[in-house]
Image: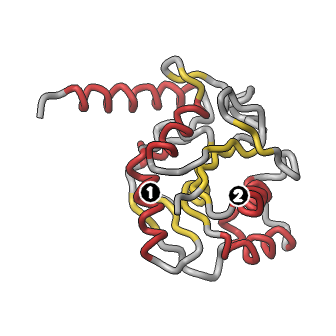
Amino acid sequence: MSPVGVVLCGGASTRMGHDKANLELAGKPLALWVAEALAAAGAHPIIAQGGSPPPPLVVSPDSTPHGGPLPALVDALERHGDILVCPTDVPTVPAGLLAALAEHAQLTDAPVVLARSDRLEPLIGHYATAVLPTLRNGLRAGARGPRAALTGSPVPTVPTAPADVLNVNTSADLAEAEAVLASRAAHEALPP
C-alpha cells in the first residue's frame, strides 16, 4: 500500500521573510517541487500539511498552527495513516531518495525511516502510524520537533548527499538550490 505524500507547509518562514511554499525556484513554487518528487516516488495522494500552498495542492490544516513540525506530523498521521513526508523548503529532494525511504520502510518493522546526509533529517522520511504514541508522548513533554520525540530508540536511515536535502532558508540557499537543479539537468542531458 502506498503511503500518503505529505508536504509540510505550515512553518513561519521567519528566516526567509515570506511564505516558502509559494516561493518560486526555476519558475515553480517550492511546494510543487516537493509534491512532484513525492508523487514520482509512488506516494498517493499528495497533501499539504498546514500553510497556504499553491494549487493544485489540497491543504490539511494544522490543529496547532505554528506549533512546529511535531504536531503537524501527528495531524498528518492521524488523518491519513502512513506518510512519506518532506518539508516544502527542500525542493532538491530527489524522487529516488523518497522511494528508497518508502522501500526501506517495507523491509523493516521500525515505525520510522529517515534520510541521513551529513546529519539526520527528521522531517524527510517515512512515518508509520505505529509511531503515533511516541510522537504524542513527545508533544506532551513539550517537544516541537520529531528528533526530541524519537530519542531513545534507533531509527533506520537511508544515506543521501547534502545537495539532495538542501534546506532553503535564505536567498543564498535559493540560489544554491537553483545551481543544484541546473547541474542535475545538465547531467541528465549528457549522452549515455
Q: Badge 1 is on which residue?
A: 118
Residue extending farthest to the left is 192
Residue 173 in the image: state x and y as whole percent.
53, 32
Q: Earlier in the sequence, mark 2 or mark 1?
A: 2
- Determine whether, in the image, residue 35 is placed left or right of residue 18: left
Rendered residue at 65%/66% (across/down): 147
Residue extending farthest to the front is 1
Question: Marks 2/1: CA distance?
Answer: 30 Å
Q: Nearer the viewer, mark 2 or mark 1?
A: 2
Rendered residue at 64%/82% (across/down): 152
Q: Secondary structure at mark 1?
A: loop
Q: Badge 2 is on which residue?
A: 80
Few, some or many C-alpha atoms within 10 Å of disc 2 (few <14, some 14-19, many ≥20)? some
**Residue 4 falls in which quadrant of the image?**
bottom right
Rendered residue at 62%/35% (across/down): 169
Residue 137 in the image: state x and y as whole percent.
80, 76
Q: Secondary structure at mark 2?
A: helix
- Determine whether, in the image, residue 106 is placed left or right of residue 192: right
Residue 62 in the image: state x and y as whole percent.
83, 48
Q: In this orientation, which residue lies closer to the viewer: 124 or 132?
A: 132
Name which residue type carries label 1: Asp
